């Protein structure tokens, strides 16, 4: 049985979301300054490359992608969305840019998307994203809120059991 939530979650009817790691959006790190994140990672000794990958080859990490945001981004133009790189792990899981990815993959799944690949596992990339000094956190589609919580240590602690799974 469909709920009111199903109408706002792009992932409900989309098999591309199968296999996400089940992390709520509010707990996903949002990297506001990708260049600063790359510099920080490189200073910490991590290998980072800029490349591109087909949109349909990427995998979501978070559960729940807001349909309204995806539709708005499609209306604004996929070619503009595809210019800003997504941050991904070596396992092709997205760290930051889920809504842009969804808009692109819905419009043109074969379109190459510029990415910044951090050559670590998805779980390690989540840890690094949460440790980055400039990290922010988005709202949760399930909570139906638009407020953003910046660098909230409680979110980092709440994420630990998810990172330790599996």
Image (spheres, rainbow, N blue to C red):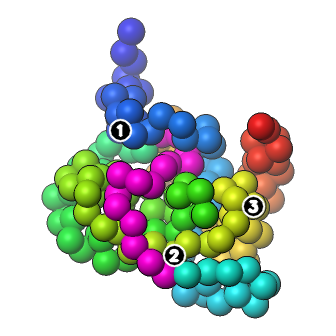
Numbered disc in front, either 3 or 1:
3
Instruction: Indicate the quadrant containing the C terminus: top left, top right, bottom left or bottom right.
Output: top right
Q: Position of residue 144 (x, y in %)?
A: 47, 39
Q: Position of residue 93 (x, y in %)?
A: 55, 55
Mark number, residue 124:
3
Whether residue 150 sits left or right of residue 55 in the image: it is right
Q: Judge the density around disc 1: few (<14), some (14-19), many (≥20) Cα neighbours within 10 Å.
A: many
Q: Which residue is mark 2?
A: 116
Q: Judge the density around disc 2: few (<14), some (14-19), many (≥20) Cα neighbours within 10 Å.
A: many
Examine the image and state in which quarter residue 129 appears.
Answer: bottom right
The span from disc 3 to disc 1 (Cα, nearest Å) is 26 Å
Q: Which residues are magenta?
A: 50-64
- Front position in the image: 21 or 130: 21
Q: Position of residue 91 (x, y in %)?
A: 59, 57
- Front position in the image: 24 or 165: 165
Pointer 2 or 3: first along the chain: 2
Q: Position of residue 94 (x, y in %)?
A: 52, 58
Q: Which residue is mark 1?
A: 10
Pointer 3 or 1: first along the chain: 1
């Amino acid at each position: 049985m469909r709920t009111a939530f199903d109408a706002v979650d792009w992932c409900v009817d989309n098999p591309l979301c199968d296999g996400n790691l089940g992390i709520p959006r509010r707990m996903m790190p949002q990297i506001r300054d990708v260049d600063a994140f790359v510099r920080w990672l490189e200073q910490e000794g991590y290998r980072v490359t800029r490349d591109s990958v087909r949109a349909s080859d990427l995998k979501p990490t978070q559960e729940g992608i807001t349909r309204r945001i995806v539709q708005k981004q499609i209306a604004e133009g996929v070619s503009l969305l595809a210019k800003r790189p997504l941050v991904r792990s070596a396992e092709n899981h997205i760290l930051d840019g889920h809504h842009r990815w969804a808009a692109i993959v819905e419009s043109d799944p074969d379109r190459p998307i510029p990415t910044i690949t951090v050559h670590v596992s998805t779980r390690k990339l989540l840890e690094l994203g949460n440790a980055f000094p400039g990290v922010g956190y988005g709202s949760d589609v399930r909570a139906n809120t638009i407020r953003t919580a910046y660098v909230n240590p409680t979110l980092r602690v709440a994420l630990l059991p998810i990172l330790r799974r599996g």
